Image: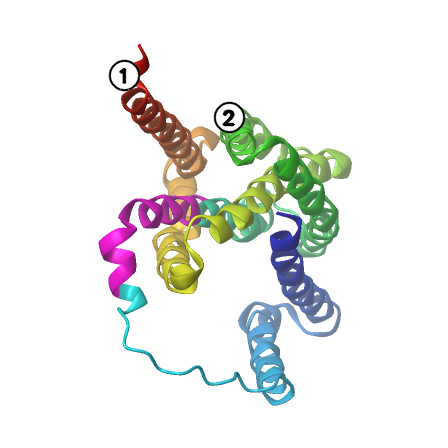
Amino acid sequence: ARQCAFAYIYSIAGFLLANVVCQLSLAYTPMPYHHTLAWRIPFFMSAILAVIAFKILPPPKPTPQKHRTSPLHKVFKHHKKPLLYSTIIATISGIYYYYIYVYLISHMIHDRHYKPKTAYIINGICLILSCGLVMLFANLSDKKGRTPLFLFCFVAFLLFSIPLTEALSSPHFITQLLSYGLLIGLFSAFTANAAAVYGEIFPASIRYTGLAISYNGGLTLSGFTPALCAWLQHTHQTVLITTSPLLIASAIGLLSLFIRAWVLTVKLFKNNACYF
């Protein structure tokens, strides 16, 4: 899990780059230009970095072609359950990510009336904190197992999503930072665990294919979360309704753990029925 968690830490660099760009835009451009142009700059810089990376990295070595079944065919024919399970995990992860990293920043500025600079500072501090937390939880996942950590995350999100989101309305910076930091911490725990599961759930021969389908499919399904939460906030004006995507995702994750545990228990009972 610790090795897989590095992929998340690398992605933090991109988040921090966007945060720095927003801070510079706030400092050196008029507000109308900030709203219309600042969010485009990180994407432009990412495109430049991608071109540089392709130039620097050596081309992949060609693999000999063999007469074998397509990995795509194998995934859908022999690995339907792992595909469904990993898609559920990716969808839940996407909902958590889009709610915490995308929607809440906009919510702080437009609904809670934070200064943009304050929201970006809180976000930047918590992103840096997340790098350490994800390694801590990855180590815990290796020691205690994947299922207990998933169980902790789902229950914690169910219990604390509403009060932590409500705490963002506090006028005190420390309370704002702690509430957002705790949400980031819970997401770090989930991500550290999920990263390991992504690498373990499929056999090596179809791993990239299975993950490409489930991960991108899950993020596509969850991509509407910020728009949905913004609509719920403006139509109902209650934290309970606004956080409902988070609560529903956590409840589905909890239910999937129980179903998976039940299926494994039934299989174990059937396999050992002759001894009873």
In this rendered view, identify the residue nearer to me: 112 or 127: 127
Residue 273, picture quadrant: top left
Q: Examine the residues drawn in magenta and state their main secondary structure.
A: helix
Residue 80 included in the magenta stretch of the image = yes
Q: Residue at x 74, y 47 (%)?
A: 132
Q: Residue at x 36, y 40 (%)?
A: 235
Q: Is residue 21 left or right of residue 90?
A: right
- Which part of the image, by quadrant, shows the C terminus? top left
The residues colored magenta run: 73-92
Do residues under tags 2 and 1 come within 8 Å of each other at their CB atoms? no
Nearer the observer: mark 2 or 1; the answer is: 1
Q: Is residue 155 left or right of residue 31?
A: left
Residue 240, picture quadrant: top left
For mark 2, give the secondary structure: helix
Visible residue check, residue 144: yes
Hey, which residue is sitting farthest front in the picture? Answer: 275
Indicate which disc residue 274 carries.
Answer: 1
- Cα–Cα gap, marks 2 and 1: 37 Å
Above-or-below relation of 249 to 228? above
- What is the total number of numbered labels drawn onto the structure image? 2
